[in-house]
Image: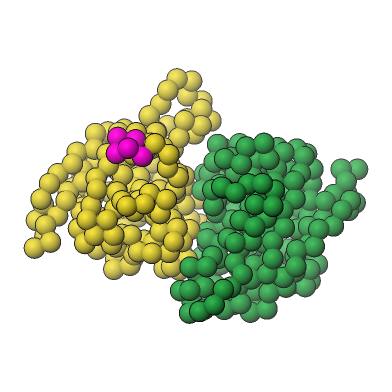
Chain colours: A yellow, B green
Amino acid sequence: MSAQELIQVPATEGRAVTLSAGQAFRVVDVEGKQVADLFAFNATDVGEYHSAMHTRAAVSHLFPKVGEAFVTNRRRPILTLVADDTPAVHDMLIAPCDPERYQGLGVQEWHASCRENLEIAMRELGHDRIAHPASINLFMNIPVATDGSLGWDPAVTAAGDSITLRAEMDTIVVVSACPQDIVPINDRNPTPIAIELLDSD
Amino acid sequence: MSAQELIQVPATEGRAVTLSAGQAFRVVDVEGKQVADLFAFNATDVGEYHSAMHTRAAVSHLFPKVGEAFVTNRRRPILTLVADDTPAVHDMLIAPCDPERYQGLGVQEWHASCRENLEIAMRELGHDRIAHPASINLFMNIPVATDGSLGWDPAVTAAGDSITLRAEMDTIVVVSACPQDIVPINDRNPTPIAIELLDSD
């Protein structure tokens, strides 16, 4: 599959892309150690969207494996994990960062967040009222210990590492280059993400 | 704390109870090996509700420990885990069962579900349009292996085992005695749950 179109997601920002059923795309960690919060909505009815709790029930795993699908709140496949050219460390447990998160971390002024990036990207497509689903936190390193405790470690991806997904319905995908710079998940240095739309040839 | 009022949740059904900030209650597995799906909404604004992904971020654990709080989608405490008189096996990873779940399991006709029980209980309180948050799956036995794979095992609770929670704001709590009888989480025998409201003396 060759690259058809490249969408740059600047550091700390978000971008939306609308995909047709069957279209594949790559999410690239451009400089490495950068988390990408990904959301997916049915393009024809945004009341249907990727749901982490339904996906875990579908695949009986904390995160799908290559060849498996992410499913919606109506338990229908929306994205398939086609390839993973990273160390395969991703998270679907932790909420996207939001203004309340940064307040809780002691930030006094406005701080970019994945939640706000989602809202801005969807508003630009005319969707003012949306659900706030759990994000697919690509490249995010949240180790789960045997006692259930969770770590907050820097991403282990290198520059250019990528994951390839395929839309299983007409889908709006929003990707936020996570602005988190207080806890170490992005190595305290938020950097860009790229989305490559792929030809099917 | 002594019992003030007892609410019976018949097998496969759900019940709502509205609590004042500070009020404690016990959720009892009456006959044992029965999952209780619990939802919590801010009673004065049901757009705020318990959010599993925010709670995991708050406690850095798959499930809060005794003394820790469950938080809302606005990252505010809504319930505190006061005591756990069970083997402390609970789940917050798996979506509440819904009609699509039973269709996927091959059920042709209507089947009771925790999602429908939530909707019925909230509708009786006048809330026709609600979010569908992740449930707190009390007593549910979903072992997480070191490779991230999830089991679906029978609950390990005995008759009379209970968990005690305290409302941290005026809260609508909905408890569904999970109707799942196809996968073995309720030992394929759905039974009742009880909610005991407690005096603070």
Q: Residue at point 31% right, 51% down?
A: A43
Image spot of residue A163 (x, y percent): 25, 55
Q: Residue at point 57% right, 78% down?
A: B182
Residue A110 visible in the displayed image: yes
Give yes or no for residue A125 being in the magenta stretch: yes
What are the residue bounds of the magenta stretch? Answer: A123-127
Give yes or no for residue A176 being in the magenta stretch: no
- A22 displayed left or right of A131: left
- A197 displayed left or right of A16: left
Residue A184 visible in the displayed image: no
Residue A19 vs A56, above or below: the answer is above
Picture quarter with the N terminus of chain A: bottom left
Q: Residue at point 40% right, 59% down?
A: A72
Q: Residue at point 56% right, 73% down?
A: B110
Which residue lies most toward the top here?
A: A109
**Magenta span: helix, strand or loop, mainly?**
loop
Residue in front for this viewpoint, A160 or B164: B164
Residue A187 vs A108, above or below: the answer is below
Image spot of residue B99 (x, y percent): 52, 68
Image spot of residue B89 (x, y percent): 64, 63
Picture quarter with the C terminus of chain A: bottom left
Residue in front for this viewpoint, B129 or B10: B129
Image spot of residue A138 (x, y percent): 33, 50
